[in-house]
Amino acid sequence: MATADYMLEVKDLHATIGEESAITQILKGINLSVKAGEVHAIMGPNGSGKSTLSKVIAGHPDYTVSKGVVLLNGENILELEADERSRKGIFLGFQYPVEIPGVNNAEFLRMAYNQKRKAEGKEEADPLDFEEILDARMKILDMDDRYKERAINEGFSGGEKKRNEILQMAILDPALAILDETDSGLDVDALKIVAGGINRLRGPGKAIVLITHYQRLLDYVQPDVVHVLSGGKIVQTGDKELALEVEKKGYDWLVK
Amino acid sequence: MTETAILNKPRFMREEPRPAITPAQEAAIPLWIAEGPAALADIRAAAFNALRKTGLPHSGSEDFTFIRVGEFLPHLGPPAESAPERSGDRSPAAAEIESQLVAEAAEAYLVLIDGTYHPELSRPGSGFRISTLSRAELAAEARAALALIASQETDAVASLAMIFSRDPLVIQVEAGSVPGSPLLLLHFHTGSGVRSDSLIIYHGAKLSEAVLLVRHSTLADSATSANAVATGSMENVQTVALLDEGASLKFLEAGASGSGESTLIRDIHFRKLAARLERNSRLLAVSAHTGSRLTRNSFSVDLAGEGAEAEINGATVLTGNRQSHNFIRIRHLVPHCVSRQLFKSVAADQSRSSVDGTIYVAKHAQQTNAYQLINNLMLSDEARADSKPQLLIHADDVKCSHGSTSGKLDPAQQFYLESRGLPPAQARALLTIAFIAEVLGKADKKGFRAVLDRALLDTLKNRLPAAAKGVSHG
Ligand SMILES: Nc1ncnc2c1ncn2[C@@H]1O[C@H](COP(=O)(O)OP(=O)(O)OP(=O)(O)O)[C@@H](O)[C@H]1O
Ligand SMILES: [Mg+2]
């Protein structure tokens, strides 16, 4: 099969954290291929390496890739810095978004948006035009105007932080979105809104990877493929039935 | 000795031992007091007594731990020509005053030249009673509090301000009065190559509420400027705030105007806010500076009545070989008081900053709540930032915390911004600006905040990579 059929290809990915005497191997040979238009779900026990995988793909400097490649539309991205990967269309919705006091949320979104436009060879957006785009996205996510005044995630509740991640995704309109437990900490109403935001991104040119522990998100965003990650490896791949099975039986039957 | 030679001198190197005060001072000061206005004599005498006890600063002075005393000692002693009215040599032109005004206080500003109040250039606004100490009707309690502060002073430079300030400006707000607008104090310094001493007294009577905005600027091209360039000058400004029961004061100070690199660097700035807070009174201070050859900001707050609250904030952005040293003494003298301190500095190039802050809790000051945080950010390996947070607690039922951090930006925050497509330089600029903006945000008067933004954040942006240019701050 032609490589270019895949938006994301992870091949035999090994990654470690730490230096010299304290190196820990976390990813131990991950293989994952996601086509444009697909939604994949990754499930797996705590500590299995799900967040690590997402951060390695996004270019987190704490991790060292000891083996393997990550291709985006056929191009190896492992040599790129995090910001370059972002501008190529990778978006990571963090499991634990950090608070950044003193940096205004709306201002930050505009800067990120303009960086993306610059990378696409477009002009910076007029502040008023951007405001319109922002307002429209915020309305869909049922976020009120206060979010614009506030510093990034500062004093946000868990659910508000996750909604803010989806807002950023909606503004940046990435080719590949990896959402790390974006459903955790949301009540049912918020979950529906966030799922709506994810479904809006879904489309022929887009790929989405959902990391989750729960079936309930997958009720709203139906995955094409479900993987189970355990001990730094993908131990099972199936269709959406696999998620239901995991919810019923837990992981023990998959983990030797 | 060249300037670099001074900077490279090892810290804590012993200076020559110096006499407490010089015989010339011993002789000159009583004369100065005797010849001055009678209404000032008691305060000046109290300050003189304190000075004799303390003596002039020396290298072992606890009040000057991070400062090389030799850098300013030659400026102490009686001001060169104490007798004749020196100020007024050079007055600010209308346009110069205009350029210093801020929207909140366009109709309420006082002009001081080298510490001397000039009513003919001022517009006192409404709600503030303005006079000078020689003629002010200052309530007996306020006068007593002022004398107490003068007599307990352990900082020789502050004592000198009290002794030599010509006729201190007195600002009073009557009981229950809430002036409709802030009052802006415009300090113009002629930079005439010598020391100028000034004392400003604020008295907020019971349940009054007011905002003081303070700006400093140096008048360019005074007749003596050639001399001034050679020797530099020393401005010594002390503000005493006396807050009666339930009174509230916001004191917002901008160290210098603009982000000018040239004129102010040669000068030595000593600024002090000494406050005494009675029952249920509140003080919020924000002081923002870009330093100078030597800047020392001192805060001394006595929480003297139960339920009093003081919040002291400092922000410093330093470039070149500028220095700024903060010195804070908060004294919890009675139970149930709250104090909070937040000091942040960004040091670039070869600049030096320090924060020396002590919270003292007296034996009976139970239920004290005191908090102090010092954060330093270094933009270069040659910059230096020292912190000395200290708790001296003699009561047993208190909640006190202090901490200091020094170093680089938070890597998790940086990764977050970069993961959204911001180039590393832009992410760093944004975080550096946010670091300082947190303190500036406490100055919640829009026009004045803009002054602080221009002074500190623009200085910072000039220092950061081009990526920072697009960074705004809100
Ligand atoms: N700095 C570190 N040093 C050493 N080990 C680490 C470090 N950070 C994470 N780990 C380990 O790496 C493993 C994978 O962590 P990761 O966060 O990727 O798991 P996860 O699958 O996302 O778990 P969860 O479901 O709880 O979010 C864990 O065992 C964790 O303890
Ligand atoms: Mg995780």
Image: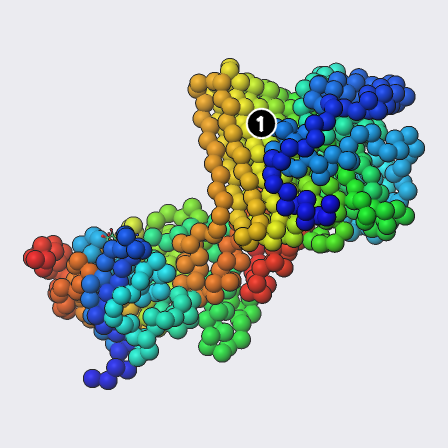
Q: Is residue B218 above or below residue A194?
A: above
Q: Quick one: quadrant of the N terminus of chain B?
A: top right
Q: Which residue is mark 1?
A: B330
| Coordinates of residue B65 in the picture (x, y in percent) | 61, 33
Tell me the subunit letter for badge 1.
B
Asked which quadrant contains residue A43, the reply is: bottom left
- Relative to B280, residue B312 above or below: below
Residue type beneath disc 1: Ile
* Residue found at x 73% / y 23%: B20
Residue B286 left/right relative to A135:
right
Q: Position of residue A19 (x, y in %)?
A: 31, 55
Is residue A219 something one can see in this rendering? no
Within the image, what quadrant is residue B165 found in?
top right
In the visual, does B267 lie left or right of A236? right
- Label 1 CB less than 8 angstroms from ligand 1: no
Q: Residue at x 9, y 59 (%)?
A: A254
Q: Which of B412/A181 is in front? A: B412
Is residue A82 in view from this perspective? Answer: yes
Q: How is the image coloured?
A: rainbow
Q: Residue at x 68, y 33 (%)?
A: B15
Work out whether B185 lies above or below B158: below
Q: Position of residue B377 (x, y in %)?
A: 53, 48
Seen from the viewer's position, the closer of residues A215 and B463 is B463
Mark 1 is surrounded, within 10 Å at the Cα level, by few (under 14), some (14 to 19) or many (20 or more) other residues, namely many
**What residue sits 78% from the left and 36% below the top?**
B75
Question: Eyeballing the image, is B108 above or below A176?
Answer: above
Task: Give the farthest residue toward the right.
Answer: B84
Q: Is residue A193 left or right of residue B350?
A: left
